[in-house]
Image (tube, grey):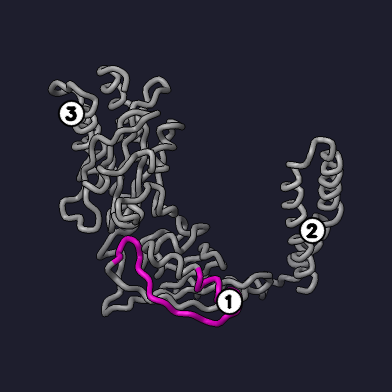
Amino acid sequence: MAQTEEFGEELADFVRRVAELKAARSVPHDDLPTVLDTAIFELDHVADQLWPWYERLTATGTAGTSSADRQEQQLLKGIFQRLPLPVALTDRETVVRRLNFAATNFTGVRAGYATGRPLSGFLAHPDRAAFRSQTAAVARGDGDRSLTVHLQQRPAVPVRATLTALRPSGEPRTAVLVVLQSAGARAPSAEGGPGPVPDLGETTRHAALMDLLDAMTTALLSGPATTRAAVLERAARVLHGRFADWVVADEGAARLCRTTVLGPADQRDVQAEDLRAQDPAACPLVVEAARGGSAALQVRPEDPDAFGRDASGAPVLVRANVTSLLCVPLTLDGAVQGVLTLFRTGPRLAFSMAEAQAMDMMSRHIALALSKLGCP
């Protein structure tokens, strides 16, 4: 263990020196040879010292692992997976390392999808900072913690998260064990809300997408459209409700103009007028789509300011409780005609890759209809 800690300190020193070398790239041209010589020296240090050291540590660890130890580890993994309580193992940044069966049912998130992603990303936006802070405190050794949080897909149900430090055998860093329990009378489950999509529903989902494509084509071809704004509104009405809770249409590319905003009728936290009054240039997602011409699919968006703020200064994605979004440029022959942004909120299932692909196809049809009415 002492050798492992010593290797970790040496590696941390190397990382710091590399950061200093990166900062030295701005030195005058005459001093660059010195910086280059230093970089070569550091590379030699990795090849001649750090890598052989790492191989020795790995070989020692492998040789020291007996068959009994491996059986014990397998037993502990099995117990972890079958615990009746929802349990997650994370690092100090809340990144999920393991999620047991009960936790997948409790959160409605597949273990394979959750692994490698921050557990805080599955919580409501107001709870994320507090959860990350408490997790870091537990990992530092400041003692066990407990706090009440809310899952983003079920924000009305309070969840008690209990955090305790755990030092896995043979690992240099402390992990955090998170136990999730309903703070109310009844524990939420995947049966009563959104959960993993059953494989048997693939045919149904495909048929629904085909119906949507047909409806979009019919809307674009039926009836005269005298303005580009009318085309965007017609397309938005096809997508609204059946495909997305919110549909926001912006016309143009260099100078964006918001033409259509359709949202839920029962939305109280944010109104369509709030989004209609927004300047599209203040929405980083829309600007990026208009400039780069590439679509964006985000599930549980990490950046609350990705779609800007409303008149009160609050992030739109937080106020609307957006759980997934699609931002699609309307592109024809490389020229952007406009941008469509779609939100799904609350317990609704997130946009899938298949749905994003179908939306990409529809965006080309919409762009073709816009091009018939001239340049923006």
Residue 123 place in picture, x, y as percent: 39, 64
Please report the bounds of the magenta region as a residue range.
133-155
Q: Are marks 2 and 3 in contact (CB under 8 Å)?
A: no
User: Mark number for residue 91?
Assistant: none
User: Mark number for residue 55?
Assistant: 2
Question: What is the secondary structure assignment of the residue under circle 2?
Answer: helix
Front: mark 2 or 3: 3
Q: Which residue does the numbered mark 3 point to in the structure image?
A: 219
Q: Quadrant of the C terminus?
A: top left
* Residue 63 can be seen, yes or no: no
Q: Quadrant of the N terminus?
A: bottom right
User: Mark number for residue 166?
Assistant: 1
Q: Are marks 1 and 2 in contact (CB under 8 Å)?
A: no
Tell me which label, 3 or 1, sits earlier in the chain.
Answer: 1
Distance from the alpha carbon under mark 1 to that under mark 2: 26 Å
Question: What is the secondary structure assignment of the residue under circle 3?
Answer: helix
Q: Quadrant of residue 230?
A: top left
Q: Is residue 74 left or right of residue 158?
A: right
Question: What is the secondary structure assignment of the residue under circle 1?
Answer: strand
Q: Is residue 49 left or right of residue 315?
A: right
Front: mark 3 or 1: 3
